[in-house]
């Protein structure tokens, strides 16, 4: 780790300090801004005033964390572009969110996704999803991000890992608790720009030094420049696991996870709710080139002798490149970008936890609770959730790779939730009892598989997480279909407006075609998605 620490110039330090101060001030100012809306709607959903560019940037920023900047560079160094599929495959569930899920979320006027499950199924389904969503936000979105950020700061600046976790947690929790969702999306929009600028700088500089694409291709094995691999490839990410497993975890993450979808719930109208995820889909094209590719370029530069062969831990790839390639000033900017990625993910997760607790737990037992009490309870829960995440985050070191670790946990949480949501919007016969049985049984099976995988040295568990997700998803689908067909429940009143009679119905619109018509934008995104896989297959 010592070899990759940055020699900090006063200019770099000043940039980092100014960034911290600026983000905290902006977030707190958002909390005092009168125009954000009145009461709990203004705090939790930004007064439902968000437009599609802000939604798209916020979706991307909440998704991208220090885990991505660091771990994707690590994967690029070790396995080439293979794990870039996690970025480009995200376009599929983002299209599903835009075309099939967002319209129902807006029409149902919901504040949380558990609220949607109650409208579609039952109160018990809502309670279960609320609890699972809070747990996943703490353990996945916050815990992994805090730990990864702390490891990076230790490697780059020699800062104690526990000290880093606590300081970043306090700073992020401060403006999130005060400002609510408006603070989150405003700061995330700025943080996304900083993140992209920092990542693009290191990619451009390294790409220039390696001699462009020809220099890169001559210095690494041809297979490292491809995304779709065989089952025998060392990356252990065969092409079929990508196409079978990712849609399962992607449907939960992008379409049914409160931390992500809350930005869509705060949309100004249905059109903005549709365009926001599509805009995020276009941005998701970039990470392969600015997060994964730099790691591969780093390998090429070392083989060309343009970087010292002193990188002993692949986890230090990103810090190693920053230290050896960037000039004074840009080092501080990239360090700020790393902090931006960490803070944006944590702040988004904290706000979703506050929203879930206030709407789905507190308001259920106290229906007449005041807006002031809801907001205060949300702030208290924000602090408690951050403390829980701080306690959990050191256990993340159990995994050899942070990125593979976070993917594994998602694979065990997502299947039952994805099954319940997708059948809920496409099949009117899907019943409340079937949904509840699927959520309970699927989550139990997920816990069993998680334990088998956690102790795999003793259990000899060998099924890759992505394939485990697919198998669990199939089991959940079968269970829900069978229970629904066997039950004699009457369709819940009002359910007809929350179920597509056929998928093509999602493409019907009274508005004339225009350049910002969601159907045209979606078609363009699909064409680009297919083209990318043809080129980098």
Image (tube, rainbow, N blue to C red):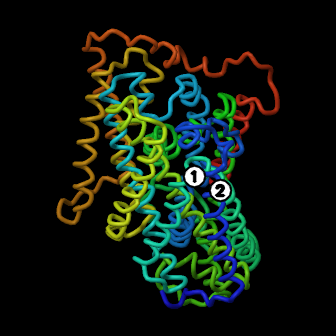
Q: What is the tally of numbered marks visible in this picture?
A: 2
| Residue at point 28%, 27% (across, down) | 479
Rendered view: 196 above or below 434: below
Q: Position of residue 86 (x, y in %)?
A: 53, 53
Name which residue lies at 38% across and 50% down.
Answer: 136
Residue 179 is tagged as: 1
Whether residue 436 sits left or right of residue 41 in the image: it is: left
- Name the spot of residue 12 as percent of width and height, x first: 68, 82
Local packing at callout 1 (Cα closer than 10 Å; few below 14, some 14-19, many 20+) is many
Residue 29's tag is 2
* Label 2, label 1: how far apart the Cα atoms are: 7 Å
Given residues 199 and 328, the one toward you in this image is 328
> Decide: marks 2, 1 in contact (CB < 8 A)?
yes
Question: Residue 491 appears at what percent x and percent y?
Answer: 37, 11
- Which dot marks residue 378? none
The structure residue drawn at horizontal position 76% and vertical position 72%, both measured from the top left corner, is 212
Q: Residues within 10 Å of mark 2 (few under 14, many from 20)?
A: some
Let me know if residue 217 appears in the view.
yes
User: 314 or 38, which is in the foreground?
Assistant: 38
Q: Estimate the x, y position of residue 8 in percent, counting from the top left.
A: 63, 88
In terms of sequence position, does the residue under pointer 2 or pointer 1 come before the other? 2
Residue extending farthest to the left is 458
Q: Is residue 284 visible?
A: no
Helix, strand or loop at mark 1: helix
Is residue 318 positioned above or below 418 on the image?
below
Q: Which secondary structure lies at badge 2?
A: helix
């Amino acid at each position: 780790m010592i070899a990759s620490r940055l020699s900090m110039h006063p200019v770099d330090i000043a940039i980092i300090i100014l960034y911290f101060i600026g983000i905290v001030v902006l977030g707190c100012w958002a909390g005092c801004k009168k125009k954000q809306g009145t009461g709990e709607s203004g705090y939790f959903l930004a007064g439902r005033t968000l437009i599609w560019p802000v939604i798209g940037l916020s979706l991307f920023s909440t998704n991208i964390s220090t885990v991505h900047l660091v771990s994707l560079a690590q994967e690029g160094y070790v396995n080439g572009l293979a794990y870039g599929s996690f970025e480009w495959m995200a376009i599929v569930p983002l299209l599903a969110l835009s075309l099939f899920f967002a319209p129902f979320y807006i029409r149902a006027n919901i504040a949380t996704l558990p609220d949607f499950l109650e409208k579609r199924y039952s109160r018990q389904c809502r309670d279960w999803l609320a609890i699972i969503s809070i747990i996943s936000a703490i353990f996945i979105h916050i815990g992994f991000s805090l730990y990864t950020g702390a490891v990076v700061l230790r490697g780059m600046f020699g800062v104690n890992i526990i000290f880093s976790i606590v300081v970043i947690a306090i700073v992020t929790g401060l403006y999130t608790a005060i400002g609510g969702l408006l603070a989150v999306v405003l700061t995330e929009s700025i943080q996304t720009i900083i993140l992209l600028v920092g990542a693009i700088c290191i990619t451009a500089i390294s790409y220039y030094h390696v001699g462009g694409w020809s220099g890169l291709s001559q210095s690494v094995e041809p297979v490292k420049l491809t995304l779709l691999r065989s089952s025998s490839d060392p990356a252990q990410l065969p092409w079929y696991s990508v196409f079978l497993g990712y849609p399962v975890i992607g449907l939960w993450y992008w379409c049914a996870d409160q931390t992500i979808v809350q930005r869509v719930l705060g949309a100004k109208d249905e059109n903005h709710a549709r365009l926001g995820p599509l805009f995020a889909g276009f941005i998701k094209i970039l990470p392969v080139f600015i997060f994964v590719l730099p790691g591969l370029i780093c390998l090429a530069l070392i083989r060309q002798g343009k970087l010292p062969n002193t990188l002993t831990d692949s986890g230090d790839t990103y810090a190693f490149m920053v230290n050896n390639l960037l000039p004074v000033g840009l080092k501080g900017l990239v360090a700020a970008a790393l902090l931006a990625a960490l803070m944006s993910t944590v702040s988004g997760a904290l706000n979703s936890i506050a929203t879930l607790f206030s709407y789905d737990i507190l308001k259920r037992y106290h229906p007449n609770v005041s807006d002031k009490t809801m907001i205060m309870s949300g702030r208290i829960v924000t602090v408690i959730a951050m403390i829980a995440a701080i306690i959990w985050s050191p256990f993340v070191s159990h995994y050899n790779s942070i990125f593979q670790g976070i993917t594994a946990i998602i694979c065990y949480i997502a299947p039952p939730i994805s099954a319940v949501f997708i059948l809920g919007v496409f099949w009117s016969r899907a019943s409340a009892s079937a949904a509840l049985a699927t959520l309970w049984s699927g989550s139990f099976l997920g816990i069993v598989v998680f334990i088998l995988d956690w102790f795999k040295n003793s259990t000899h568990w060998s099924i890759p997480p992505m394939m485990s997700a697919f198998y669990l998803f199939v089991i959940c689908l079968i269970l829900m279909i069978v229970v629904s067909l066997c039950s004699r429940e009457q369709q819940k009143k009002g359910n007809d407006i929350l179920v597509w009679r056929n998928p093509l119905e999602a493409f019907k619109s009274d508005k004339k075609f225009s350049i910002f018509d969601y159907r045209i934008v979606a078609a363009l995104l699909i064409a680009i998605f297919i083209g990318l896989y043809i080129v980098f297959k």
